[in-house]
Amino acid sequence: MYRGFLVGGLASITWGMTPIFFKYMADFTTLEVVAHRVVWTVVTMLVVAYFTQRMTRLRLALTTPKEMGLITISAVLITINWLAYVYAVETNRITEASLGYYIYPLMVVAVGVFGLGEKLSAREWVAVTLAFMGVVLKTYENGGAPVIALIVSASFTVYTLLGKTRATGPVVGLLAEVIVLVPFAAGFLAVLAINGVGEFGAGGAVNSGLAVASGIITAVPLVMYIAASRMIGIAFGGLLFYLAPSLQLVIGVMIYDEPFTPLDGVAFGLIWISLLVLAWPRRAKA
């Protein structure tokens, strides 16, 4: 359990610190950052798959038509998620991106109710209502819907639900997804290099190193988080996940001086309470 919490905590802290990393990639465009994440995640995950003996599973995933269909859709969704998140960091909207990851579990519940016809308990209705009120307040504060937060949460929600319907596990699944994306990402980076506007190589050693590292900080925390979830269970792993958006929120407000008004505090507070309501353990029936 101790090792599980340590590994899971490190994974969540790494995810939470990613705004600082992507701020250092300010010379890159959003598309260029995401393209490098794809290319270098392929390299990193191939190493992981080889040493964890997952290459057979990868081959099976890439040669099964039904799995490939689901993997391709997942690849599109994760691309949208990465684009929205990196764009949020680059445009000083880290707090809004963090809001998206807080909304995510509640959106999963909403999909279950309105999309799959599932029934909610009274407590779950309270949680969803509180979260909805928080989003409404944030919409009022913004003068419009928090678009980035909704894109981040919606793409990650569908991505997660889709991942549960396929046979491929998360490690092999991520590798298969970026393999699907890598021809487009590598082609885009090649065009930039040919035209002399790409940051990799031409941007100096620091920018080249950041590009390579983008794949490592994408892949390694995922592998650590999966390992931790197996040691401590999915429920505790899910709670550790919220370290990441909490750190992102603190970084956005305390380091990059993003605005956080009293109304923002109320909106986030309602969503935090709703998450506590969802996470509170149920009493065992006699």
Image: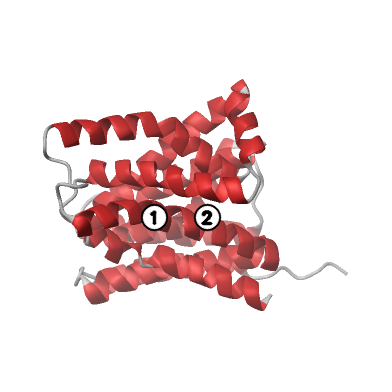
Q: Quadrant of residue 65?
A: top right
Q: In the rendering, at what x and y percent does residue 27 appear?
A: 15, 53
| Residue 49 to residue 89: above or below | above
The three-letter code of the residue at mark 1 reads Gly
Q: In the rendering, at what x and y percent does residue 169 appear?
A: 63, 44
Q: In the rendering, at what x and y percent does residue 66 appear?
A: 61, 24
* Residue that carries the numbered disc 1 in the rendered image: 100
Q: Quadrant of residue 132?
A: bottom left
Residue 245 in view of the camera: no
SS assignment at label 2? helix
The three-letter code of the residue at mark 2 reads Pro
Dot placed on the residue nearer the N-terminal end, 2 or 1: 1
Which label was assigned to residue 33? none
At horizontal 17% and vertical 42% (from top left) the residue drawn is 198
* Residue that carries the numbered disc 2 in the rendered image: 105
In the image, farthest residue toward the top: 65
**Closest to the observer, 168 or 98:** 168
**Do the residues under discs 2 and 1 have CB atoms within 8 angstroms?**
no
| Residue 22 to residue 286: above or below | above
- Snapshot colouring: secondary structure
Quadrant for the C terminus, please: bottom right
At horizontal 48% and vertical 58% (from top left) the residue drawn is 220
**How many numbered tags mark residues here?**
2
